Image: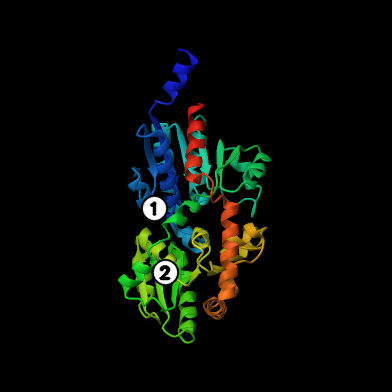
Amino acid sequence: MNAADASADAHSKKLNLMLVCGEPSGDALGAQLMAGIKQLAGDRVRFTGVGGLAMAREGLESLYPLDTTAVMGLREVVPAIPAILRRVKQAVEFAVQTRPDVVVVIDSPDFTHRVARGIKKRDPAIRTVDYVAPQVWASRAYRAKAMAGYFDLVLALFPFEVAFFDKFGLKAAFVGHPVIERAGKVTGGDALRARLGIASEAPLLALLPGSRTSEIRFILPVFFGAVRLLAGIIPGLVTVLPTMPHVADKVRAATADWPTPLHILEGEDDKYAAFDAADVALAASGTVTAELALAHTPMVVGYKVGGLTYFLSKFLMTVKYITLINILLDREAVPEFLQASATPDNLALAVGGLFSDSGARGKQVEAMKEFGRLLGEGDEAPSLRAARVLLEFVERG
């Protein structure tokens, strides 16, 4: 077989890719990666692994649902450890039995890295890739050295991560942040207001308390207190709360006596329409803050975890901020309040300031545009670039 025939054979070979995520944000990223792979490789790829609704829509049959693994905070994780470890073992066994061409783990390192380590321990020949690596450059950098022992490649979201991981002997390729691709979905605000009966001039606050059960428990009550204060100073305030199906019942129970008109939304389209419709957002720290920034929706960030979790994390953090836009810009472009400072009074004051001060809103929007440029906005779609790098890695053998 000559070189041309070998190349053609490599590009026609059926591929078995195993993708593993642990929570809804990873599910969204996994779905984008799958769409990019299908765009480049067509129907010659079979997807297996662990994912949620978004990945299922792209053709993944998940080994199990995400509800067990989508937990955070010591108080929530500890009781779930036996179930999580069973899920880890199940994913590892599946990989060893089916021997996929590559295993890609996505975000949620406390869960997905256990899967990668288990696979490498059982069968070192199975190649493993980390997509959305933990921000070890911000906390516990020594973990990068450990990662080099059970990952063959990191698909890096930020350009500086390539050199960082290289110092620890771990190959990385910059692909950009896939959250950029969601900016185009931020439409339909006027239609959403009309459908929900919200007047076009009514002040609208989007609430994003997080998608984990622990976040609903710790953060939503603080948001409730902030909205109660805001209702007294912003006449006609309306709130909209996009949520995920697996916590929707808990959200409805926790908001039964909400102090303003409240619309709880499920579904991705309504979430982005809410970003488009809202004047201001109040959000928990996480991927959603990057989505809001790329949507140019002015926001305030508040975050709380269990006391023991926070106590331990204080000794490990090496960055000044918790919100990605602030980390990358190295300034507090978006007001953020963590733990003891995440009080209803502080959040209400900051949110109220954005409603009343068009200059403050405009300043945030300019910072958000700068943030988008740093993430690679305007270049090739990150998930497509990630798909290309991954397929080249697989086909190199």
Q: Residues within 10 Å of mark 2 (few under 14, many from 20)?
A: many
Going 40% across and 81% down the picture, which residue do you hit? 260
Indicate the secondary structure of the residue bearing disc 1: loop
> Which residue position is annotated with label 1?
66
Mark before the other along the chain sequence, 1 or 2: 1
Place residue 25 in its image quadrant.
bottom left
Is 308 on the left or on the right of 17, as rendered? right
Going 57% across and 52% down the picture, which residue do you hit? 375
Indicate the secondary structure of the residue bearing disc 2: helix
Type of amino acid under label 2: Ala
Is 285 on the left or on the right of 93, as rendered? right
**What is the C-alpha distance between the residues marked 1 and 2?**
30 Å
Q: Position of residue 258 (x, y in %)?
A: 39, 79
Asked whether 185 or 80 is in front, the reply is 185
Q: Position of residue 33 (x, y in %)?
A: 44, 44
Asked whether 373 or 229 is in front, the reply is 373
> Which residue position is annotated with label 2?
277
Type of amino acid under label 1: Leu
For the question of whether residue 47 can be seen, the reply is yes
Q: Position of residue 329 (x, y in %)?
A: 64, 59
